Image: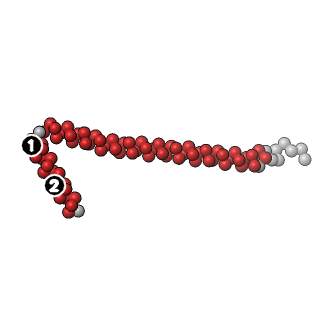
């Protein structure tokens, strides 16, 4: 906790000194850094959603294959239908 407070205060001090020397540069740099940090989370979210879609597709394929093999293994699922015994 102490190291976090120390790093935060050093960053604030350096930011204030830089802002005093070149305010427009500090504002642009802070905006670009904020944009990059936001893009990191957006890209991660898109990757996470894509992974879930692929997993759902694989799970759906397994269900279809298992169901089809069960139907074929049970004589087409039509046993007892139309028998004239």
75 and 10: which is toward the camera = 10
Q: Is residue 52 left or right of residue 27?
A: right
Q: Residue at x 44, y 46 (%)?
A: 48
State the image coordinates of residue 57 (x, y, percent, origin top left). Answer: 56, 43
Q: Position of residue 85 (x, y in %)?
A: 90, 47
Q: Give the quadrant of the N terminus.
A: bottom left
Q: Give the residue at x 77% y 49%.
A: 74
Left or right placement of residue 45 versus residue 53 in this view: left
Name the mark on residue 73. Answer: none
- Measuring from the top left, give residue 76's x and y in whole percent: 77, 44
> Residue 45 sits in which quadrant?
top left
What distance separates the C-alpha of mark 2 from that of mark 1? 17 Å
Which residue, as the protein is rendered here, is positioned at the far left? 20
Q: Earlier in the sequence, mark 2 or mark 1?
A: 2
Dot 2 corresponds to which residue?
9
For disc 1, the neighbor class at 10 Å (few under 14, some 14 to 19, many from 20) is: few
Residue 13 located left or right of residue 61:
left
Q: Residue at x 59, y 45 (%)?
A: 60
Rendered location of residue 44, percent (x, y): 39, 45
Give the SS element for disc 2.
helix
Residue located beneath label 1 in the image: 20
Question: What is the crowding at mark 2: few (fewer than 14 residues within 10 Å), some, or many (at least 20)?
Answer: few
Q: Secondary structure at mark 1?
A: helix
């Amino acid at each position: 906790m102490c190291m976090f407070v120390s790093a935060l205060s050093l960053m604030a001090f350096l930011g204030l000194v830089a802002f005093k020397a070149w305010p427009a540069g500090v504002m642009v740099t802070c905006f670009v850094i904020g944009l990059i940090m936001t893009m990191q989370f957006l890209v991660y979210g898109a990757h996470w959603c894509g992974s879930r879609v692929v997993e759902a597709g694989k799970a759906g394929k397994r269900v279809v294959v298992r169901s089809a093999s069960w139907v074929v293994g049970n004589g087409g699922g039509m046993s007892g239908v139309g028998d004239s015994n």
